[in-house]
């Protein structure tokens, strides 16, 4: 009887040891396929990790200072004023690829925007958004939210649609950025939620932002 008890005890000890030595299941790794994987440059060419904005709702915009859509800086600043405290951040990326409508240095662009539109949201270094020189960030943004078409009920939207269609009847199938002030909305987990073309109504942009805040 004592021998049986000893064998049972020994088996229990071995079983406990086996349980303790069993490797733990690896912790679930958060997806790296989000905007936080990218590093960009601010207007002074300092690196900025977009992981610094984790947990915030982001609106990423390619801008220009001499465009017909440049007055949207006013709308963007108003959005920022109304929703920044709730977690909205707007990231401004000047781009000179559309009619060369963003000339000047980063410093000159910043001075123009603060002097004329009282911009207070972050302005990054000038970048390319299309072509071989397109930033990695914009290549990713376009892959997540391809071009969805201009609002042709808008006069300028209809004009842009006709202009691009005359150049390429299949232009809508190309995910490239079509013009200045295209906007990408990013949720608090770093995922692209929606793409807005420059002719989309700012009221629609604000409504979509409010749903994420």
Image (cartoon, grey):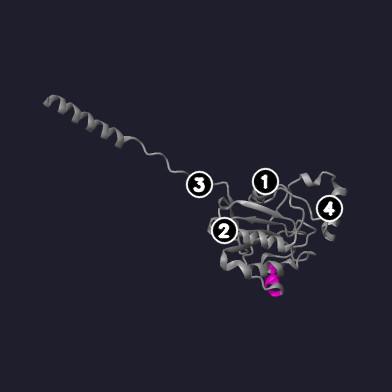
Residue lying at the far left in this picture: please name it.
Answer: 2
- Residue annotated with mark 2: 47
- Image coordinates of residue 130 in percent, x first then y, are 72, 50
Q: Would you place residue 117 above or below residue 145 in this image?
A: below
Mark 2 touching mark 4, by CB under 8 A?
Answer: no
Q: Is residue 124 visible?
A: no
Mark positioned earlier in the residue sequence (1 or 2): 2
- Residue annotated with mark 1: 143
Camera-side mark, 2 or 4 = 4
Mark 1 touching mark 2, by CB under 8 A?
Answer: no
Mark positioned earlier in the residue sequence (3 or 1): 3
**Image quadrant in which you'd find residue 124:** bottom right
- Residue annotated with mark 3: 30
Residue lying at the far front in this picture: please name it.
Answer: 1
State the separation of the CA atoms marked 3 and 1: 20 Å
**Image quadrant in which you'd find residue 71:** bottom right
State the separation of the CA atoms marked 1 and 2: 23 Å
**Image quadrant in which you'd find residue 46:** bottom right
Numbered disc 3: secondary structure: loop
Q: Would you place residue 102 above or below residue 34 in this image?
A: below
State the separation of the CA atoms marked 4 and 3: 40 Å
Mark positioned earlier in the residue sequence (3 or 2): 3
At horizontal 56% and vertical 50% (from top left) the residue drawn is 37
The residue carrying pointer 4 sits among few (fewer than 14), some (14 to 19) or many (20 or more) residues within 10 Å by Cα, namely some
Part of the protein shown in magenta: 108-115
At horizontal 73% and vertical 60% (from top left) the residue drawn is 181
In the rendered image, residue 174 lying in the magenta stretch gets the answer: no
Q: Is residue 74 visible?
A: yes
Magenta residues: mostly which secondary structure?
A: helix
């Amino acid at each position: 009887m004592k021998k049986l008890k000893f064998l049972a005890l020994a088996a229990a000890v071995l079983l406990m040891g086996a349980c303790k030595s069993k490797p733990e299941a690896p912790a679930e790794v958060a997806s790296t396929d989000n905007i936080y994987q990218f590093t960009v440059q601010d207007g002074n060419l300092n690196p900025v990790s977009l992981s610094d904005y984790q947990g915030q709702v982001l609106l990423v915009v390619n801008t220009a200072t001499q465009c017909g859509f440049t007055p949207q800086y006013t709308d963007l600043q108003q959005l920022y004023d109304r929703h920044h405290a709730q977690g909205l951040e707007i990231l401004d990326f000047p781009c000179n690829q559309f009619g060369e409508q963003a000339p000047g240095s980063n410093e000159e662009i910043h001075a123009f925007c603060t002097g004329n539109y009282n911009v207070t949201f972050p302005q990054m270094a000038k970048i390319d958004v299309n072509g071989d020189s397109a930033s990695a960030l914009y290549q990713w943004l376009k892959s997540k939210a391809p071009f969805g078409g201009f609002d042709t009920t808008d006069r300028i939207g209809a004009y842009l649609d006709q202009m691009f269609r005359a150049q390429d009847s299949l232009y809508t199938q190309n995910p490239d950025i079509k013009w200045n002030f295209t906007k990408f909305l990013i949720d608090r987990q770093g995922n692209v939620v929606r793409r807005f073309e420059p002719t989309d109504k700012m009221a629609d942009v604000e409504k979509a932002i409010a749903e994420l805040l």
